[in-house]
Image (cartoon, rainbow, N blue to C red):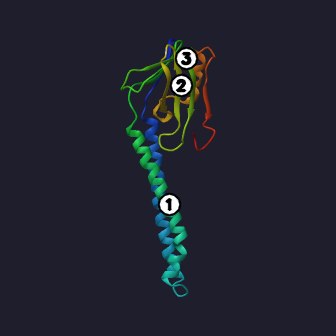
Amino acid sequence: MQTPEAFVVGYSPVPAAGRVARAESLMRRAGLSVVIYIVITAGLYWWLRDQLSLWQVLLGGIPSAALVLAFVIWRWVELRAARKSLGRVPAGEAVRIDHRGVRVGDGTSDPIWFEWPAMSDIAVAGRKIGAGPDLIVNGTFPNGGGHQTWKVPISYLDTLPGTIDSAVRAYSGGRQGLDMSGMDSIFGD
């Protein structure tokens, strides 16, 4: 719910479900690659059976079989991570941005307020595998409250980072912006 008083970002399983659907599709393609590999290997053996022994065909196919197997394992790991990520998406309000600051929460504990003067940064950074990069909010609280960090994967949210950046800039009066430089590296932090 967006009002002039606040910009609210909720949790949504839709992006995480999309990631699962893509991972399932890629896993099916990996399975198809295995079938094609087996058909080509069997065809080559049948066609060259007078010139090569079965042992020679199998020995020659070990490097390509290892590549195909590694590809299937990689796709399976991606699918498993995507399904695990989908199961972790909470419900409710994740981030509330207003003129006071940013309130964050996971729905299971009390929300945390990061007031604009105490906020050190708000950024998107992290690895691209699993749930993907995180929205990270850092701040130092007055009166000995110490440093606090809160983060949530962007794929759990119902709003894109560019929209969050616009809201942060608008409600902070231009004092803050969403730092997306952490997404420049494909390997993350």
CA distance for labels 3 and 2:
9 Å
The amino acid on which the numbered mark 2 sits, given as a three-letter code, is Asn
Query: Could you tell which of marks 3 and 1 lies nearer the N-terminus?
Result: 1
Q: Is 40 located above or below residue 104 in the figure?
A: below
Q: Which residue is mark 3?
A: 118
* Left or right of 152 in this view: 167: right
> Measured from the top left, where is residue 167 in percent x and y?
56, 20
Q: Which mark is residue 70?
A: 1
Q: Quadrant of the N terminus?
A: top left
Q: Earlier in the sequence, mark 2 or mark 1?
A: 1
Would you say residue 167 is visible in this rendering? no
Q: In the structure shown, which secondary structural element does the residue marked by tag 3 occupy?
A: helix
Residue at 39% across / 37% down in the picture? 88
Residue flagged by tag 3: what amino acid is it?
Answer: Ala
Tell me the CA gap for discs 2 and 1. Answer: 39 Å
Residue 103 place in picture, x, y as percent:
47, 19
| Kind of residue indicated by mark 1 | Ala
* Total labels drawn: 3
Mark 3–mark 1 distance (CA, rounded to whole Å): 47 Å
At horizontal 45% and vertical 39% (from top left) the residue drawn is: 16
Disc with the residue nearer the chain's start (3 vs 2): 3
Determine contact: label 2, label 1, CB under 8 Å.
Answer: no
* Picture layout, residue 149 above or below residue 70: above
Q: Tell me if mark 2 has few (under 14), some (14-19) or many (20+) residues whose alpha carbon lies within 10 angstroms of its own.
A: some
